[in-house]
Image: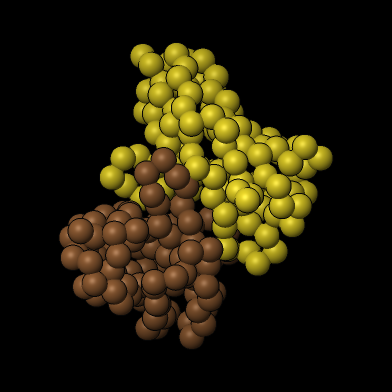
Amino acid sequence: DQQVKQNSPSLSVQEGRISILNCDYTNSMFDYFLWYKKYPAEGPTFLISISSIKDKNEDGRFTVFLNKSAKHLSLHIVPSQPGDSAVYFCAASGTNAGKSTFGDGTTLTVKP
Amino acid sequence: NAGVTQTPKFQVLKTGQSMTLQCAQDMNHNSMYWYRQDPGMGLRLIYYSASEGTTDKGEVPNGYNVSRLNKREFSLRLESAAPSQTSVYFCASSVVWGYTFGSGTRLTVV
């Protein structure tokens, strides 16, 4: 049973528009959520996170929203840039801090 | 600022051979992790070490062993490689949340 799901394998948007990446989870013990970005042939890099006590966290062009009742989070990128084209992974951790469970990733393509 | 360094970057093994993947971090992080990523899938946790001297199994530990040699180094050993272990292996470290990943080891078992 996959505890973290990213149901859209791919997403394509025009440069300057909003990108919305979605993630659902099933384990109610998760209390910290993270997004990572991965370019080909590189390791993932940490992008943004949110604690379960918040419903929104913003960092520049990136905003993460958390809906605990729906067990759903989303990453908004505004405005999208071609350099944002990458695979985005959603991850979740429980009270055992660092150990994270990852989704399968969404490949974002931003077209010029 | 090297961050997390993994060696080797590429490796081809024959079925039944053994090898050790090396990982070292220079950020004084307590926790270290080994994940594998198969095509079209997310990262699955193999083993982790919450602190020096401790190791615990993750989601897919079968066929692997680990050693937390010191605070900096965390190695992953395949005792008898199988084609199902063909994957990209990532080492990561963290203070609490938010990993720093290495660039990965692409392993092919033939």
- Residue placed furthest toward the bottom: B53
**In the rendered image, which quarter is residue A84 located in?**
top left
x, y percentage for residue A93? 63, 57
Residue at left offset 66%, top offset 39%? A24
Image position of B85 (left or right of A26): left
**In the rendered image, which quarter is residue A58 located in?**
top right
x, y percentage for residue B77? 33, 75
Residue at left offset 54%, top offset 29%? A8
Chain A, chosen colour in render: yellow
Residue B66 appears in the figure: yes
x, y percentage for residue A41? 28, 45
Looking at this view, is B40 or B69 the one in front? B40
**In the rendered image, which quarter is residue B107 located in?**
bottom left
Image position of A112 (left or right of A106): left
Image position of B76 (left or right of A35): left
Above or below, comparing residue A56 to residue A46 in the picture:
above
Q: Quadrant of the C terminus of chain A?
A: top left
Above or below, comparing residue A87 to residue B34 in the picture:
above
Looking at this view, is B98 or A86 the one in front? A86
x, y percentage for residue B110? 20, 58
- The figure's colour scheme reads by chain
Q: How many marks?
A: 0
Chain B, chosen colour in render: brown
Above or below, comparing residue A29 to residue B23 in the picture:
above
Residue at left offset 54%, top offset 50%? A102
Residue B22 appears in the figure: no
Residue at left offset 46%, top offset 52%? B43
Looking at this view, is B88 or B49 the one in front? B88
